[in-house]
Image (cartoon, rainbow, N blue to C red):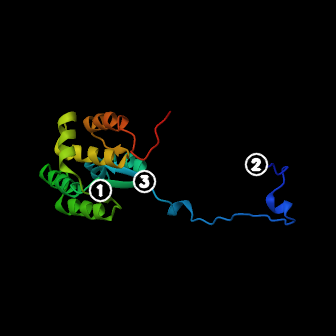
Amino acid sequence: MGCRRNQGRPLAARAGERRVSRILIAEPGRNYWPKPPVVVDSSVIAAIVFDESEQEDARRTLAGKQPVAPDLLRFEITNVGMNRLRQGKSRLEDALEGLEHFDDLAIEFAGIVLAPVLRMAARYKLSAYDASYLWLAAELRAPLVTFDKRLAAAAADCLANLPPPEDMPEKP
């Protein structure tokens, strides 16, 4: 049984009906669209919350993106504040104000899995702290933003060599 050609006329027209279908779409403005995730480390966030010289670069890079970080970022930022106090770069009030600013940032926090973090730390000769950011970026398949050259080099290698996602079809 073969297929018949419809001689270029729609089925509705052949049945004596004329039907025009127009699909309408209403959607929110761009400011409601999901922001792409980007993993941020403590160097980037510290620049923002403690008004460091790289602050504008950090803000510009994160604009329009959803910052994501391992839970340990909270402790690292608090430690940066403490180090600034010890080094005489901040007064206690300024460090506390920076921490309040940190609490106002829309950072999404995520847990980590220890074994792969340790593997990454060993492979790339990173601290477990830095490897946590790298692992999260690899897990989310998201860019990693940092001012740390060693971490950036590890991320460039790691993220460029990720295996394809399991649900992605193979290229012929």
Report helix, strand or loop for mark 3.
loop
Mark 2 or mark 3, whichever is nearer to me:
2
- The residue nearer to you, when weighing 167 against 128, is 167
Labels 1 & 3 near each other (Cβ < 8 A): no
Q: Position of residue 56 (x, y in %)?
A: 39, 48
Residue placed under numbered mark 1 in the picture: 49
**Mark 2 residue type:** Cys
Outermost residue, left side: 86
Task: Locate residue 66: give its quadrant.
Answer: bottom left
Q: Position of residue 41 (x, y in %)?
A: 28, 48
**Disc nearer the start of the sequence (2/3):** 2
Instruction: Give the crowd class for mark 3: few <14, some 14-19, many >=20 residues within 10 Å.
Output: few
Report helix, strand or loop for mark 2.
loop
**Mark 3 residue type:** Lys
Residue placed under numbered mark 2 in the picture: 3
Residue placed under numbered mark 3 in the picture: 65
Q: Position of residue 119 (x, y in %)?
A: 19, 40
Residue beneath the point at 30% across and 34% down: 153
